[in-house]
Image: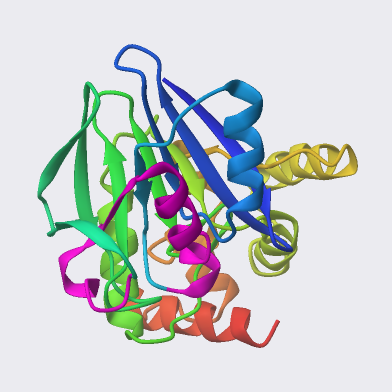
Amino acid sequence: MQIIPLPCLTDNYAYIINDNNSKTIGVVDPSEAGPVISFLKKKNLKLHYILNTHHHFDHIGGNAELKKLYKAKVVGFYGDKHRIPGIDITLKDNEKWNFGNSIVKILHIPGHTLGHICFFFEKEKLAFTGDTLFSLGCGRIFEGNHKQMLISLNKIKSLPKDTKIYCGHEYTYKNAEFCMKHDDKNLDLIKQFEKIKKLRLDNLPTVPTVLEDELKSNIFLRCDKNDVKIKLNMKNEEDFKVFTKVRDLKDAF
């Protein structure tokens, strides 16, 4: 299986999923149709599925044009069927769906939006996390609340450590700067930041990331760690309060 990130708009990523065995082609979160159409034409491919992690326009903006052109099926969360235009296949939390020869498990991960989901390709260990988990960051909380977001992040944390994470935006450099400000003694983070600097200097994507690296370096996944709590003067506080503090600090960063 091939995953190809396509830069869209200012800092979005759409992802082409090419299941070579079954010849099934999908795209995750096409904010605009143009880059997707250009890629498919160049490779002489036909689009079968459009997978949406949530309803925000910068993740569904290309749906209508792509559906009309390729007769592709739009796949999304059952609870968001009224907010994702042209939706054909609605899926619920923990439901499994077949993409070609692959089994995809749906994780409902509210917080950024109430209907946000993650598409987890079980055998391949690929997770499309949209705007919930970023490389070295997490999404802003628009419709849900901090507790929902923390529960959602913990769901993702429970996936196999070698899972590849495909997020919705190229925010990694700025996220790394924030993590460094509040977790500056973290040697794994320091090493990761050096890699990120080189990638961005060469105008290369920082995605996918690997869950194991996120667990070591992403401060939003480390709110249960004593060194993070001590740095924030919250040594004896609950993980939820620490996460809330970190998210609020990032909102003001």
Residue 224: say if magenta.
no
Nearest the camera: 59 or 177?
A: 59
Which one is in front, 55 or 61?
Answer: 61
Left/right of residue 192 with respect to residue 22 in the rendered view: right
Visible in this render: residue 222?
A: no
Quarter holding the N terminus is top left
User: In this rendering, would 56 be left or right of 77?
Assistant: right
Above or below, 105 relative to 67: above
Residue drawn where x is 80% and y is 38% of the image: 199
Q: Which residue does the image show at 49% across and 70% down from the upper left?
A: 139
Residue 70 drawn at (x, y percent): 42, 42
Q: Residue at x 37, y 67 (%)?
A: 54
What span is colored magenta in the figure? 56-84
Residue at x-position 31% and y-position 77%: 83
Residue 79 percent across, percent down from the top left: 17, 73
Indicate whether residue 72 is drawn in magenta: yes
